């Protein structure tokens, strides 16, 4: 089953509308969607290594734009939609702690959490709720998301064939590791 899903994803990643799908996933992940854009980014770069920089650029741009939506949700709709997203992920008890930490280390929070498998939507929504400086927020999102997505693209562009061979040979292991990272990112929020 994993093999069919993997082959299907690689096939989709090579299609002309794949960039739009990546943009949509990346945009929504920064404000409310639970699945990270790496799920689409990695197969796209593996399928089209010659377009690695374009793919990473689309992923970064869409993520920052989605982050701006998350910021707006936190700024204008924190008590309604923002609270709903926070509650959906079971993070309501972490918001107060995160907000107090955010007062002192806001820029560091954006830069670090943008690189980790911790849901970025929490950072964007709380940034808006805390009225964090908009140009600094956008700049930090560009740096952290750009670094993450361009680093993945660079590794796959440079070492794509061996990485793809590794993934294909150990597909179940890679899937379980990715799943563990995703679940671990959400679980880490409970302890941070």
Image (cartoon, rainbow, N blue to C red):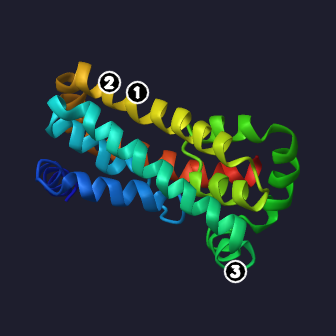
Q: Which residue is mark 3?
A: 80
The residue that disc 1 covers is: 151
Residue extending farthest to the front is 135
Judge from the rendering whether residue 18 lies leftward or rightward of residue 122; answer left or right.
left
The residue lying toward the viewer, choosing from 70 and 121, is 70
The answer to whether residue 75 of the structure is visible from this angle is yes
Circle 2 crowding by C-alpha within 10 Å: few under 14, some 14–19, many from 20: some
Q: CA distance from mark 3 to mark 2?
A: 40 Å
The residue labelled by disc 2 is 154
Q: Residue 188's x, y, as percent?
A: 67, 48
* Circle 3 SS class: helix
**Residue at position x 79%, y 60% from top?**
95
Evaluate if marks 2 and 1 touch, with contact meaning CB atoms under 8 Å apart. Answer: yes
How many other residues sit within 10 Å of disc 1, few (<14), some (14-19) or many (≥20)?
few
Residue 56 vertical placement versus 126 (above, below): above
Q: Residues within 10 Å of mark 3 (few under 14, many from 20)?
A: few
**Numbered disc in front, either 3 or 1:** 3
Name the residue rendered at 55%, 54% in the picture.
Answer: 67
Measured as percent of width and height from the top left, residue 139 is found at 59, 37
Where on the picture, by quarter, is residue 157?
top left
Image quadrant assignment for residue 113: top right
Q: In the image, which is nearer the foreground, mark 3 or mark 2?
A: 3
Decide which of 29, 188 is in the foreground and name it: 29
Q: Earlier in the sequence, mark 3 or mark 1?
A: 3
Q: Earlier in the sequence, mark 3 or mark 2?
A: 3
Query: Horizontal and vertical percent for residue 173?
Result: 34, 41
Report the quarter where the N terminus lies. Answer: bottom left
């Amino acid at each position: 089953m994993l093999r069919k899903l993997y082959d299907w994803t690689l096939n989709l990643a090579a299609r002309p509308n794949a960039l739009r799908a990546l943009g949509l996933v990346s945009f929504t992940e920064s404000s409310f969607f639970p699945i990270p854009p790496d799920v689409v980014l990695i197969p796209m770069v593996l399928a089209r290594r010659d377009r690695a920089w374009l793919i990473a650029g689309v992923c970064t741009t869409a993520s920052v734009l989605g982050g701006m939506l998350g910021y707006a949700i936190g700024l204008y709709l924190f008590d309604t939609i923002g609270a709903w997203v926070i509650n959906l992920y079971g993070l309501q008890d972490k918001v107060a702690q995160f907000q107090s930490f955010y007062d002192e280390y806001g820029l560091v929070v954006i830069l670090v959490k943008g690189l980790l498998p911790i849901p970025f939507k929490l950072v964007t929504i709380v940034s808006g709720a805390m009225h964090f400086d908009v140009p600094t927020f956008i700049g930090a999102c560009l740096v952290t998301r750009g670094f993450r997505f361009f680093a993945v693209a660079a590794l796959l562009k440079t070492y794509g064939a061996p990485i793809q061979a590794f993934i294909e040979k150990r597909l179940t292991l890679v899937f379980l590791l990715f799943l563990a990272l995703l679940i671990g990112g959400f679980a880490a929020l409970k302890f941070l």
